[in-house]
Image: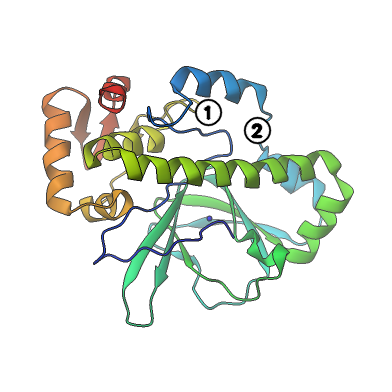
């Protein structure tokens, strides 16, 4: 989750974007926003309400549950629908002609994806799959176009979502250019646990492989393992039954010079 303009391959180990809900803002000092600014800004925004899609659209929409790693759509499929994440997380990946796979984005709840079809995209440029057990609304392109024409308030929110996501991608780029891999990992874990976002933090992160984390921040799995062990020793995170509990104190790593 139209906004993913950079394809990053595993062997290159370059950074990837981590995309969350529209109100999300960067958690790094390189950005002009800090966590206090995030909280203040998010209170001023009206969040997307998934019930709106379900009540305003009588036809052309459906709701579906996806298991972990289950594909929602595949690279090369026809692009005829827009999707909205009600719960869970969705991973976007791209496979090169040589067979190399890259994670280009992680989408949290309250995120739209697949909206490239509204701008004339005819085939999917990436594969979308559930990173966690996820609930997703699927809206057919004609129904989405009609909804945007009919509901001006929703159209404004949708435009805000797209613009905010572009800003967020720029913040991710700044993060990868100026911050260490340790800070990038800490920032990623905080974002995945919803710290600094409008929605209530959910500090327990479902099991995610160290290899995937490494791909997302542009480093090696061994470095991720080293940092995670250090965060645990410092009391910033805990492991339990394969899940990870993130404490707000982890933000000290991000803000440390």
Residue 79 in percent (x, y) is at 63, 72
User: What colour scheme was applied to this rendering of the protein?
Assistant: rainbow
Name the image quarter holding residue 31: top left
Residue 254 in percent (x, y) is at 30, 28
Which disc, if any, is residue 199?
1
Q: Please state which of residues 135 and 111 is positioned toward the viewer in this rendering.
A: 111
Residue 61 in percent (x, y) is at 72, 58
Q: Is residue 193 visible?
A: yes
Taking the spot 71% from the left edge, 45% from the top edge, the residue there is 158
Instruction: Examine the rendered structure and indicate whether residue 121 appears above or below residue 174.
Output: below
Give the quarter of the figure containing the C terminus. top left
Q: Secondary structure at mark 1?
A: loop
Taking the spot 57% from the left edge, 18% from the top edge, the residue there is 40
Instruction: Examine the rendered structure and indicate whether residue 104 appears above or below residue 110.
Output: below
- 215 with respect to 113 (left or right): left
Residue 225 in percent (x, y) is at 14, 44
Q: Are marks 2 and 1 in contact (CB under 8 Å)?
A: yes
What residue is shown with label 2? Answer: 47
Instruction: Examine the rendered structure and indicate whether residue 9 appears above or below residue 131.
Output: below
Badge 2 or badge 1: first in the primary sequence: 2
């Amino acid at each position: 989750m139209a906004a993913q303009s950079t394809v990053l391959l595993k062997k290159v180990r370059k950074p990837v974007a981590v995309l969350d809900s529209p109100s999300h803002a960067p958690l790094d000092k390189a950005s002009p926003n800090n966590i206090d600014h995030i909280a203040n800004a998010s209170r001023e925004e009206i969040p997307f309400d998934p019930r709106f899609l379900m009540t305003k659209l009588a036809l052309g929409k459906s709701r579906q549950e996806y298991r972990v790693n289950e594909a929602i759509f595949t690279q090369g499929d026809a692009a005829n629908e827009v999707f909205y994440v009600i719960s869970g997380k969705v991973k976007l990946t791209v496979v090169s002609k040589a067979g190399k796979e890259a994670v280009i984005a992680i989408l949290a709840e309250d995120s739209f994806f697949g909206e490239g079809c509204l701008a004339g995209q005819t085939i999917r440029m990436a594969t979308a799959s559930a990173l966690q057990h996820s609930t997703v609304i699927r809206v057919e392109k004609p129904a989405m176009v009609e909804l945007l024409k009919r509901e001006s308030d929703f159209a404004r929110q949708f435009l805000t979502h797209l613009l905010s996501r572009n800003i967020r991608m720029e913040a991710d780029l700044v993060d990868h250019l100026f911050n260490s891999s340790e800070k990038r990992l800490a920032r990623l874990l905080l974002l995945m646990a919803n710290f600094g976002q409008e929605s209530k933090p959910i500090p327990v992160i479902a099991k995610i492989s160290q290899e995937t984390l490494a791909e997302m921040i542009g480093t090696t799995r061994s470095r991720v393992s080293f940092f995670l062990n250090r965060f645990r020793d410092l009391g910033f995170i805990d492991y339990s039954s394969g899940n990870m509990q993130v404490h707000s104190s982890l933000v000290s790593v991000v803000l440390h010079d």
